[in-house]
Structure formats: C-alpha cells, structure tokens
Image (spheres, helix red, strand yellow):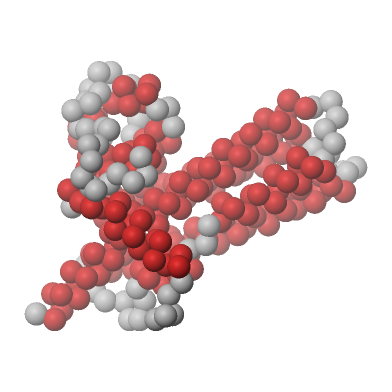
Amino acid sequence: MWGLRVSDFIIYFVTLNLFRMNKHLRYAETDKMSELICENYKLLLVMSRFGLSLGFGDQTVKQVCEQQGVHTGTFLAVVNFMEDECCVPESYREDISVEAFVDYLRRGHSYFLDFNLPVIRRKLIDAIDCSRDDVAFLILKFFDAYVNEVRAHMEYENEVVFKYVYALLEGREAGDYSIGVFAARHNQIETKLTELKNIIVKYYPAKTNNNLLNSVLFDIYSCEKDLCTHCRVEDYMFVPLITELEKKLQKHAGE
C-alpha cells in the first residue's frame, strides 16, 4: 500500500517518538563534565568529536563547552541520545545547531578513516601472517575492501550531503536532491564487519600470538558498535533535523 514497507513505518514512528518524548534527560548543562565521563567513559569519543579537550577540572558542561567554543545544546542532545536512544525531547531538537552537528559528524568520519580503522589494520598485520597463510591474506583483503566501502560512504556524506545542508542554511535549494535521498541509500555499513569477524573466529588458527589476535578482534567488535551508534545518530537525529530545515525553507519559499 502506497509503496511503503513495514520498516518505513517502524522508522517513522521511532523517529517521531525520539523527538516528542519529554522524559527527564540524564545529563544537563549544570552537571560537572568530569562526572559525565566517570559515569560513562564512552562519552570520551563524543567529546573528541566535538573537539573538546580534557583538563577541565570541576567545570560544568556549559562552562566547558562555552570555554572551548562548542555549542552546549548540540553536545547535550548527542550525549543524551548516546545514553538513551529514545530520549531526545523536542526542546533539545530546537536547541541543536546544524553547523555544530555537521562538524561533529565530520570529526566522527575523520576518527574512523584517519585513526581507528588504520590502527586496527596495523594490529591485524601484527596478529596474522599474510606471507604464509591464505586465510590471513583473505582477512586482510576483506578488511581493506571494507575500509574502502566505509571511505566511499563517508566521503559521499562529506562531499554531497553536508554541502547540501550548508546550501539549505544559506537559503538555497539544491535541485531535486533532498535528505530523503541520503536516508534511502544510508546502508548500515557496520554490519559488513560481521563477515570479517566470522572469518577470524571460525577459520584463523591463532598460534603463539593469541593475545594480540584477541585484542584486534575486540577492537573490531568495538568499532562495529561505534559505527552502529554513529549511523543511528545520523538516522534518528540528523535526518529529522534536516527534514525540518527543508520544511522551513519550503515554507518561506511559498510565502
């Protein structure tokens, strides 16, 4: 009916609830930044992607953000989403800076492409012997192909999607393109790591370096989860945010 799939309805209602629920937020601007990190160390990744540095003493979230030039409302919206993925009240959506959000996503892309994935590759080379083992060569080849796919995915966002968003912010329309085009082709790239994990777990016989191989496998699992969260932030925060921006532009154009 109407060409929609069940999954489309599920995404619609989940997205609707994300921004309409008015439950109590876990983190507020008056909380101490150090307490956020001690309570949930995974927020260190969020901090780095906002360009926030450590060494802030007992300053509050608002004080740290303002001192380091980060939009407080956007930071809080993301950290609360990371804590509870069904808790981004409408009041917070209204306080999100689109520019700050895009910068956060760009930094996330740089983290994966320029740091996290290269580090995993180096550890992978140290853990397996590609010169003597066909399975090891297959693992590295599969990993490199995966990284190329991730790079293409993120460069498309950097070069096409974000430029489109900047055009919207300047009040310019971009032909037939819309954020819906991005949403429709936004495949869950992190799920491709499942095959790589299976190859390592099922078929690579570790020899004397079990600790190193297990360590890199743990890193791959962590990367997969991090990519999943990154994609959810884009799907359930970024896409609805830009959809609203499109509606506002269309409304002004019709006046």
Q: Is residue 34 left or right of residue 115?
A: left
Residue at point 75%, 53% (across, down) = 141
Of the pair 109 and 80, the residue shown nearer to us: 80
**Which residue corresponds to the image point at 39% horizontal and 33% vertical from the top-left?**
43
Q: Find residue 121 and report its image quarter.
A: top right
At 20% across and 32% down in the image, what residue appears?
29
Work out which residue is located at the far right of the displayed protein and give it.
132
Residue 137 percent across, percent down from the top left: 82, 48
| Residue 150 point in image, percent of width and height | 57, 56
* Whether residue 164 is situated above or below residue 175 in the rendered picture: above
Q: What is the quadrant of the C terminus in the image?
A: bottom left
As drawn, 119 above or below 230: above
**Residue visible at 43% across and 27% down in the picture:** 41
Residue 28 in sight here: yes
Q: Is residue 186 above or below residue 41?
A: below
Residue 106 visible here: no
Q: Nearer the viewer, residue 142 or 185?
A: 185
Q: Quadrant of residue 76?
A: top left
Residue 6 lies left or right of residue 138; in this view the side is left
